[in-house]
Image (spheres, rainbow, N blue to C red):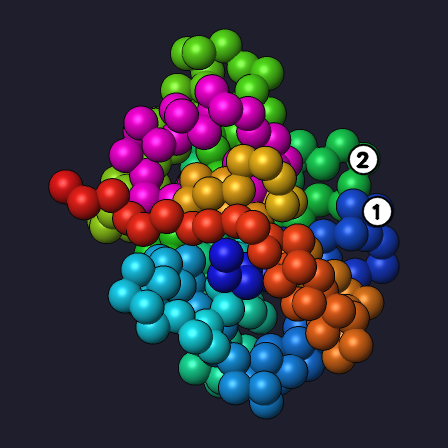
Amino acid sequence: MPLVLMYHSVARYTEDPYLITVSPDRFEAQMRWLWRRGMRGVSMRALLAGHDRGTAAGLVGLTFDDGYADFADTVARVLAWYGFTATVFAVAGKLGETNDWDGDGPRKQLLDAEQLRALVTLGIEIGSHGMRHNHIPAQSPRTADEEIVHSREALESIIEEPVTGFCYPYGDLDRETITSVRSAGYDYACAVHHSGFDSRFAIPRTYVGDRDRGLRLRAKRLRHRVSTRGSRLEPAARG
């Protein structure tokens, strides 16, 4: 199971109750840490293509949930400097709005359609994070279909290229939700934690926060290796 890092927002902040924000200086240091160790941050699409070909050694998946506008303002520049790419999982029904699902947490601006299109030209992959950031297993079949299928259609109409990846909002999934995502035609889906569902449609990721520097990053990398030792990532389905 390849190493995939999970980020959300990269910005200066004064409060961060949900621990979703990494400061720009810390993020740059984290990318430098990867680069100095011969690792290269890539999109999930590139990571999985390398895995399918047997050429994924040294590749690390970089994912950014929710699609915060600071990706365009801050993250893209750092990635370009190191020759990295990444995947942004955007909430299709909230483009240009804010993260109002975060209760009383600080409001953060989300990427809009124009920004998504610009990121695609930089080699950034856009994946779906649902329509409205709902807990999909708790939804009716009709709403779940909207979150999984309609979000993909909406994003594809904006960026004018296939959307092949899905990311479960809140990491909330069950067997039925995984089956729905697979049946919808996605190539892969990202979870949050390692679980008994580990697979191409529930890829576990490693959370990265503002406190993570050298020793903590090394420990998290090791923990990933140990916890997913028995997990296997099946190759892409062939049409």
* Of the pair 131 and 235, the residue shown nearer to us: 235
Query: What amino acid is at disc 1?
Result: Pro
2 or 1: mark nearer the eye? 1
Compared across the picture, whether 110 is left or right of 163 comes to right
Query: Height in image: 102 above or below 138?
Result: below
Q: Residue 17 — which label? A: 1
Q: Which residues are magenta?
A: 166-191
Residue at 40 percent across and 25 percent down: it is: 179
The spot of residue 10 in percent (x, y) is 65, 63
Please give the residue where the numbered disc 2 appears in the rendered image: 104
Residue at 39 percent across and 30 percent down: it is: 181
Q: Secondary structure at mark 2?
A: loop
Q: How many marks?
A: 2
Q: Secondary structure at mark 1?
A: loop
Which image quarter: residue 134?
top right
Query: Height in image: 239 above or below 86?
Result: above
For the question of whether residue 72 can be seen, the reply is no
Query: Height in image: 47 above or below 149?
Result: below
